[in-house]
Image (cartoon, coloured by chain):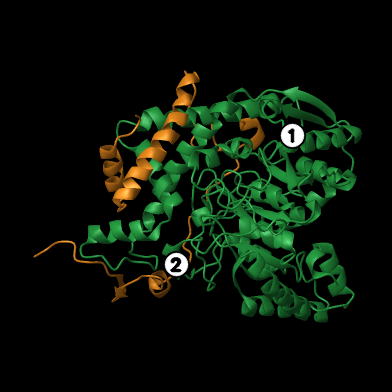
Amino acid sequence: MDIGSLTIGQVRDGLLARRFSAVELTRETLDFAAAQNPATNAYLRFSPGRALSAAARVDGKIARGDDPGPLAGVPVAVKDVILTKGLRTTCGSKLLAEYVPPYDATAIARLEEAGGVILGKTNCDEFAMGSSNENSAFGPVRNPLAPDRVPGGSSGGSAAAVAQGTAVVALGSDTGGSIRQPASFCGVVGVTPTYGRVSRYGLTAFASSLDHIGPLARTVRDAALLLQTIAGRDPCDATSADAPVPDYTQSMDGNVQGLKLGLPREYLKDLTSETGDLVAAGVKTLRKLGCEVREISLPATGYAIGCYYIIATAEASSNLARYDGVRYTFRSGDSGTLSDMYRHTRGEGFGAECKRRIMLGTYVLSAGYYDAYYVKAQKVRALIARDFAQAFSEVDAIVAPVSPFPAFKLGEKIDDPLAMYLSDIYTITGSLAGIPCMSVPCGTTAGGLPVGMQILTRHFDEPTMFRLADAFERASTGVTL
Amino acid sequence: MKITEKEVRYVAELANLNLSEAEVRKFQADLDEILGHVERLNEIDTTGVEPMAQVLFSAHHAADDAGDTATWRDDRELPPLGTDLALANAPQSGGGYFKVPKVIER
């Protein structure tokens, strides 16, 4: 058994054929992950006790002849912004270094109910703020395919673990591209579902109107299977959608004949790099599969970065106000008065990127600027969403790049926050509209770096997104420039 | 200049964020650059556009796609977390309460 390349289907077959037990698989994967982890720093901590008891429950069910669940025995890595009861959850922040959640996120409860085995918690940018995983208080993550390069962010640890083979699948979170961009950088599949498709209960809030939980996996099918188990209405999250969850694998029949695809003019005009060539090759493959490709326009694209960094930071400044030294483990030693306690706890606890975003968010919400910045951004957001609605009256799916470039070097962009923000351009538009979007590997640069292609569809049309991604994955011959 | 050093200090006060002098200078430069980019939003005409606060209920957005998907939950009691668990992560607690430094001097 090659642990590093297992799929959910192979785990299931192996368990049901009694080639290995869930406990054996869990032990082996934990050993493998512990040995591999120093190369990447993808996991912040392992949870062997929890993993082995989950595995033993699966083995018990199989022994009794019961259905062990759709994720039976599957080793899962979980981004450290998603709460796990009794298992330390730090959000990549010094402020929460000792925080032990009193409850499980709904996505966690559902994946364990489905037989999933949580191996541990993965590294990320502090409070999911960043595009390189360099903003973690616990050190950066290295890209498993190029150790001098970033894995992307903010779900860098989850993407690296899946790419490295130290988990079969992983949960990440995405606010402006934090699943898709690291998936692209690490050569794995990453899915940001429709806003509200997966409950946010137990996802540490960054920007509530934009936050999503979603899967990372080595195959489209595995990503779909993981999403299947965590999606659906949750009374604990009023913004979770009541819409029924379709059987995603049913749509993955390889037939994309006649699907209408749109290529956004605004995304492609500046993209002349290897990334552009690989995405163009991907589009050619889709054309060969029978898709009809046409150019479309998303005219408000040029305003998306400004819009996103106003709305996301405004919401973040409000959400992060709770870390004040009262409830969440860390309190500054310099806490003479109540006001000192607040100011020093936050000044010492937050890293540079969180402070920058709290400052920007507080500024755009402050008296005199609220209408000029925040309300203006909300109106622009409506225009961006309108662009997509218009496009989807003409096409079934949109195909686009994920990031303007492949994984960059550690330290290369960390001192230029605006440049880092600008690199989110292709992912934040879909986030602002709340539509499903995913990254699927579409090839490798001459230098050996993976590149992802993005697929975006209508609200709740994950089936078309998966159908297209799966057909592409089957047809893709792994283009190398 | 979009934002002055004085404004940076004022915003830090609003955010209850203690900043070093070096941070004040750094954030002034960073915010100035970012706000410079954000200014671009003024180029786009948003006359008559309703602000979009969230995705699934926006009156002018994709109502046909998303529909009324969010719903209220039943109004019934659920077991709460309980005081012990709620206080378990507090840096300081006692008698069933969070403890903080003195708020009012006698």
Q: Residue at x 45, y 43 (%)?
A: A313
Find residue A314 and report its horizontal and vertical position in percent.
Answer: 42, 41
Q: Is residue A51 above or below residue B4?
A: below
Using the rendered image of the protein, determine whether residue A78 is visible from the camera's viewpoint.
Answer: yes
Find residue A216 and report its horizontal and vertical position in percent.
Answer: 70, 55
Residue bearing mark 2 = B80
Query: Which image quadrant is residue A435 in?
Result: top right
Q: Chain B colour?
A: orange
Q: Residues within 10 Å of mark 1 (few under 14, many from 20)?
A: many
Quarter of the image with the C terminus of chain A in it? top right
| Mark 2: secondary structure | loop
- Left/right placement of residue A213 relative to residue A476 reads left
Query: Which image quadrant is residue A176 in?
Result: top right
Q: CA distance from mark 2 to mark 1?
A: 52 Å
Which amino acid lies under the numbered mark 1 shown in the image of this protein?
Answer: Gly
In the foreground, A30 or A469 = A30
Q: Residue at x 71, y 53 (%)?
A: A186
Find residue B67 and report its horizontal and vertical position in percent.
Answer: 62, 36
Q: Are marks 2 and 1 on the same chain?
A: no
Check if mark 2's residue and mark 1's residue have beta carbons within 8 Å.
no
Q: Is residue A14 above or below residue A106?
A: below
Q: Is residue B78 above or below residue A62?
A: above
Q: Chain A colour?
A: green
As drawn, the label of residue A276 is: 1
View extreme (left): residue: B106
Which amino acid lies under the numbered mark 2 shown in the image of this protein?
Answer: Pro
In the foreground, B24 or A72 = B24
